[in-house]
């Protein structure tokens, strides 16, 4: 298929127990999100957040709590609150993930819901674009799409899932986004969507590459809808997607 049909962005998306509002739009990058619980579930253990930390610096996070339903959603809600508290003290992504891991390792929660994967980004304006510091804790790789349509992964390959060991492997990656560069963050509910014995993972980069000219507000919905269609209209896992694009939309 050579083109992508327009999708209508939702005004808000269910994340955990609460309706996640349309995210704030900073002056130097655009952001859009989409989220969907697993089929048959009302609540999602996938979570996301975008918020400022001061001095024109912003944090963007997306993650996946082990498990589904109400128990995972409750942990996801708590995790988002912890992330904001940790970022108020130190907004470096590695420090935020380390603080969260310490809490998960010590907290009195059930074994089936205390583990999670997550990616955390610190964004700040630069003279020629947007400077990004990225750190992943066992999460699927962030994808970068350039204005020329080339798509590739960003980062060192994943790091360690949080809540498993006291000192997880967490490595920061720095990159500079130029005008119209787009980052795609997503949970494994996208890549592990199944059609027979085939998973959607191998198709995601191709889908993103075809999104030239698509406004960023529509990107997460396209990804979510494509994965859902690939799985025959059934999503076996929670899904969350975030797209970030350097620069402001044309007036």
Image: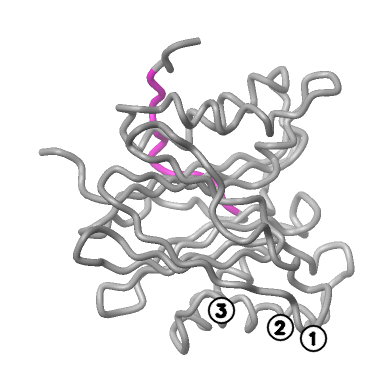
Residue 22 image offset from top left, x and y in percent: 37, 49
Cα–Cα span, label 2 and label 3: 11 Å
Q: Give the dominant element type of the magenta stretch: helix, strand or loop.
A: loop
Is disc 2 placed on a helix, strand or loop? helix
Label total for image? 3
Image depth: mark 2 or mark 3 in front: 3
Q: Which residues are magenta?
A: 6-15
Cα–Cα span, label 1 and label 3: 16 Å
Identify the coloring. one colour
Is disc 1 placed on a helix, strand or loop? helix
- Ranked by sequence position, the earlier of labels 1 and 3 is 3
The crowding category of the residue bearing disc 1, from other C-alpha atoms within 10 Å (few below 14, some 14 to 19, many at least 20), is few
Image depth: mark 1 or mark 3 in front: 3
124 to the left or right of 114: left
123 to the left or right of 207: left
Cβ atoms at labels 1 and 3 below 8 Å apart: no
Q: Quadrant of residue 2?
A: top left
Quadrant the C terminus occupies: top left
Q: Quadrant of residue 105?
A: bottom right
Which residue is rendered at x = 53% and y = 42% of the image?
A: 152
Residue 143 image offset from top left, x and y in percent: 52, 45
Viewer-closest of 8 and 60: 60
Residue 29 image offset from top left, x and y in percent: 28, 54
Residue that carries the numbered disc 2 in the rendered image: 103
Residue 41 image offset from top left, x and y in percent: 73, 40
Check residue 106 in the rendering and tell me which mark sits there, or answer none. 1
Cβ atoms at labels 2 and 1 below 8 Å apart: yes
Residue that carries the numbered disc 3 in the rendered image: 96
């Amino acid at each position: 298929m050579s083109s992508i049909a327009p999708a209508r962005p939702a005004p808000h998306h269910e994340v955990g127990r609460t309706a996640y509002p349309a995210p704030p739009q900073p002056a130097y990058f655009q952001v859009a999100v989409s989220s969907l619980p697993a089929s048959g579930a009302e609540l999602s253990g996938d979570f996301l957040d975008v918020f400022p930390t001061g001095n024109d610096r912003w944090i963007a996070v997306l993650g996946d709590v082990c498990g589904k339903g109400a128990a995972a959603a409750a942990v996801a809600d708590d995790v988002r609150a912890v992330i904001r508290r940790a970022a108020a003290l130190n907004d470096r992504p590695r420090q935020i993930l380390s603080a969260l891991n310490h809490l998960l390792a010590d907290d009195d929660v059930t074994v089936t819901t205390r583990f999670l994967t997550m990616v955390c980004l610190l964004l700040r304006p630069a003279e020629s674009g947007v400077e990004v510091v990225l750190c992943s804790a066992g999460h699927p790789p962030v994808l970068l799409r350039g204005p020329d349509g080339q798509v590739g992964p960003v980062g060192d390959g994943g790091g360690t899932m949080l809540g498993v060991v006291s000192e997880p492997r967490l490595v920061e990656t720095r990159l500079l986004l130029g005008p119209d560069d787009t980052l795609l963050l997503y949970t494994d509910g996208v890549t592990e969507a199944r059609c027979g014995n085939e998973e959607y993972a191998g198709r995601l980069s191709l889908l993103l590459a075809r999104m030239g000219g698509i406004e960023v507000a529509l990107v997460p919905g396209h990804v979510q809808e494509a994965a859902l269609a690939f799985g025959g209209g059934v999503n076996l896992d929670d899904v969350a997607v975030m797209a970030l694009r350097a620069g402001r939309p044309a007036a």
